Image (cartoon, grey):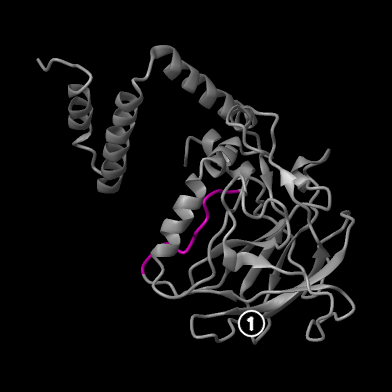
Amino acid sequence: MLAIDEMSITDAALDQMSATPNPRLQEIMSSLVRHLHAFAREVDLKPEEWLEGIRFLTSVGQKCTEFRQEFILLSDTLGMSALVNALHDKRATADTTKSSLLGPFYRQDSPTLPLGANIAGKGKGMQVVIYGRVVDSAGRGVPNASVEIWQPDDEGWYDLQLQDPSQMDLRGRFYTDSEGRYYLRTIAPTGYMIPMDGPVGDMIRAQKRHGFRPAHIHFLIGAPGYREVVTALYLSGDEHIDSDTVFGVTESLVVNVNHNDPAAPLPNLPSIKFDFQLAALAGDAMLGRVGADPSQIVKKAADGGH
């Protein structure tokens, strides 16, 4: 019989997992166990500390609903979402728009709207037009590409956080024209503090972090035959542009609001111009989402993961 101690336990656990029929599952779980055990040895983890960690993760799960995803928020604030995004980008075989976070407020059933429509039904604030093209790696327009957009309002709130989260606002899905062009109207968002009324908020306060995200607008861009792009545009000048609490900002995604753009499709409005670039599929998964609609995660968990 193997004597179990602080060193031999790792090999014992790995040996029991060695018959896992799914090779990728075996690779992931074996590495997880090795690193988790090494972490516990490195910090000399105490029983009460491990139980506190279990309590924290239990609280994270209990905070999740069909309108709120605390685990995605935890992943974001630990930099895990940004890391997985970076690994996904690295696998692309051609140039593509840099990924950013899907975040915990995505909804999969945004209304489909005609080009030029206004997604700001209730939100107030400065009206802007966002326009540009969706192009391939050679700069050719991608026709009929899906452009999903969602964002907070001028006070930093998403529709999922308001009194009736079943009502959608500041969301929409558009399709590019025959030359890959898109344009839409919305309001300029403001930066905001992440939800701080749950266990992730407790963690942020314990770490003396400010908890703020700079003003941004989310996009999910896709077309048949191309890798999906999950990204966001960040408004320059925000005081937290260099210290985003979820590590989503990349220089190439920082944009300016132009108050005098004669090329804008609605020249009477301030504008944001941005061209999204898609890379062709090359045997990898099309989706690049580090996250999902909160209601779908809850539903899948209730269905036993199927």
Q: Nearer the viewer, residue 22 or 218?
A: 218
Residue drawn at (24%, 38%), measured in percent from left and top?
20
Dominant secondary structure, magenta: loop
Position of 255 with respect to 94 (left or right) is: right
**Is residue 128 left or right of 242 when viewed as pictured?**
right
In the picture, residue 110 is in which quadrant? bottom right
Indicate the quadrant where residue 202 lies: top right
Question: Where residue 93 sits in the image (x, y, percent)?
Answer: 39, 73
Quick check: 69 above or below 247? Answer: above
Name the spot of residue 173 as percent of width and height, x first. 70, 65
Q: Which residues are magenta?
A: 283-292
Q: Which residue is mark 1?
A: 180
Camera-side residue: 173 or 249?
249
Whether 277 is among the magenta residues is no
Q: Is residue 13 left or right of residue 235?
A: left
Instruction: Give the residue at x 72% y 62%.
Output: 235
Magenta-span inclusion, residue 288:
yes
Foreground of the two, 135 or 259: 259
Label 1, secondary structure: give it: loop
Residue sitting at x 83%, y 48%: 155
> What type is the residue that disc 1 sits on?
Gly
- Percent from the top left, x then y, of residue 150? 71, 57
Q: Is residue 226 above or below residue 52?
A: below
Classify residue 288 as left or right of residue 255: left
Counting from the top left corner in percent of width and height, residue 82 is at 51, 51
Could you say which quadrant of the image residue 18 lies in?
A: top left
Q: Residue furthest left?
A: 1
